Image: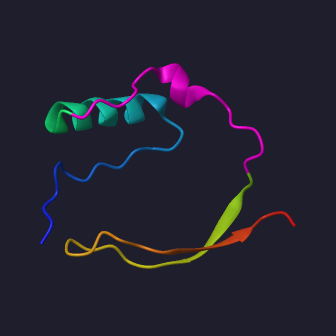
Amino acid sequence: MACRLIALHTVNDKSVDELISWVHHWSEHTNIALASAPAIYSSKVVGLKKFKVMARSTVSESNSTFTLLLKPLEK
């Protein structure tokens, strides 16, 4: 059975500060360095498409794997 390295942490996908906070927390507990310059995560990626989540599987303490069924908002 795998054990969790750090506690589950939810990051708002619109908040670079929350992501940077998680990156620092991860690095402190794992000694694995991740890039943490806010500019890396703030840049706009060209060509991204929007999707609607049609269905998702549940996540539990014993199973953190999940699936999503996505539908593009544009053709």
Q: How many marks?
A: 0
**Residue at 18% of width from left, 33% of height from top?**
31
Identify the main secondary structure in magenta.
loop
Q: Position of residue 49 (x, y in %)?
A: 74, 54
Does 16 sit left or right of 27 as displayed? right
**Height in image: 58 above or below 44?**
below
From the image, which quarter does the C terminus lie in?
bottom right
Does 40 sit left or right of 34 as displayed? right
Q: Position of residue 51 (x, y in %)?
A: 69, 63
Does 71 sit left or right of 34 as displayed? right
**Height in image: 11 above or below 68?**
above
Q: Which residues are magenta?
A: 32-48
Does 25 sit left or right of 56 as displayed? left
Q: Quadrant of residue 27?
A: top left
For the rendered model, the colour scheme is rainbow
From the image, which quarter does the N terminus lie in?
bottom left
**Residue at 18% of width from left, 31% of height from top?**
28
Q: Residue furthest right?
A: 75
Q: Is residue 14 magenta?
A: no
**Height in image: 72 above or below 22?**
below
Q: Position of residue 13 (x, y in %)?
A: 51, 44
**Height in image: 33 above or below 47?**
above
Foreground residue, 72 or 29?
29
Q: Position of residue 67 (x, y in %)?
A: 48, 75
**Residue at 48% of width from left, 35% of height from top?**
15
**Residue at 29% of width from left, 29% of height from top?**
33
